[in-house]
Amino acid sequence: MPPASSPALPDDDSQPRQLLDTFREVASAVGQALAGLDDWGLAGTKPGQYRSDLIADQLAVDLLGRAGLGVLSEESGLHHPDRAILVALDPVDGSTNASRHLPWWATSLCALDRHGPLAAVVVNQATGTTFEAIRGGGAWRDGVAIAPSMATRLGDSLVGLSGLPDHYLGWRQFRALGAAALDLCEVACGGLDGYIDCSVDAHGPWDYLGGMLVCLEAGALVVDAHGRELVMRGHADRRTPVAGATAALRDELVAARTSD
């Protein structure tokens, strides 16, 4: 995986810069470890857990722990929750895609401090494309600042979909891509106009927090479909994220998601 170029960042706070550096190193190490993996099948541990998940998780948790960070991992739960920075980690977001060699799977990391999301890195491990964001500092794809589309109407929009609705929700077109962190990052950079989760509280904080911060810093909007807080820190916490390029589109997506 080629290294991402470094974006221009604010000069007044070194901690987010250091976090981005650490997250890039972790994602790179995960990519290198999985590059030689021969067996991408299920691990036989818990439902839906692949061998790639276990290998990536062990490596990422160890590196983050040695960096003095707490971790909330999809695969192994809470580590050092007493530390000032807690990293919401999805070591392999889109594990099924990865197991089928579909080039849409990622490592997602989002640092949480007492105020909420502080810094995030989401790396498409199949392509090397890297999304980054710092609270109050902006969002970038491979070092270049990004912005969402200007779409305001669902009927004109290309929407990323997770889960299956029981009726047509009014989009122009949809894509079911299979990796929530990357899907949200595509809303941030305009590849998708919106994202809608039609499952029932299927996503944990590690699935959406990295992509959420990238969206927010790029200018897109992300909410829970049912109006709940999205910044959660528990392994059992689940939410239903919806993202829109504009407030008007976000509102229409939420209305469509909650309609009977």
Image (cartoon, rainbow, N blue to C red):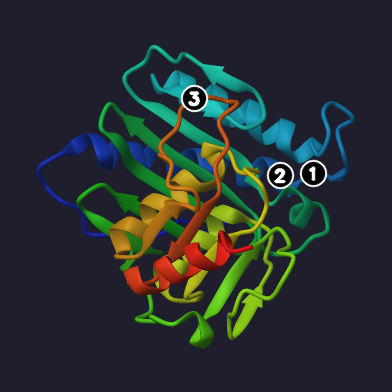
Vertical relation: 126 (above or below) 67: below
Return the mark for residue 71.
3
- The residue shown at (36%, 15%) is 83
Measure the alpha-carbon separation of dots 3 and 1. 24 Å
Left or right of 147? Residue 106 is right
Measure the alpha-carbon separation of dots 2 and 3. 21 Å
**CB-based contact (under 8 Å), mark 3 and mark 1:** no
- The mark closer to the camera, 2 or 3, is 3
Give the residue type at disc 3: Val
Vertical relation: 192 (above or below) 156: above
**Which residue is under mark 2?**
34
Circle 3 packing at 10 Å, graded few (<14), some (14-19), many (20+), is: many
Circle 1 packing at 10 Å, graded few (<14), some (14-19), many (20+), is: few
Front residue of 144 and 50: 50
Q: Quadrant of the C terminus?
A: bottom right
Left or right of 21? Residue 26 is right
**Which residue is under mark 1?**
37
The image position of residue 152, as x and y in percent, is: 38, 80
**CB-based contact (under 8 Å), mark 1 and mark 2:** yes
- For the question of whether residue 146 can be seen, the reply is no
Label 1 SS: loop
Label 2 SS: helix
State the image quarter where residue 43 is shown: top right
The image position of residue 12, as x and y in percent, is: 9, 42
The image position of residue 192, as x and y in percent, is: 51, 74
Give the residue type at disc 1: Leu
In the picture as drawn, the residue positioned furthest to the left comes out as: 12
Of labels 3 and 1, earlier in sequence is: 1
- The mark closer to the camera, 3 or 1, is 3
- For the question of whether residue 209 can be seen, the reply is yes
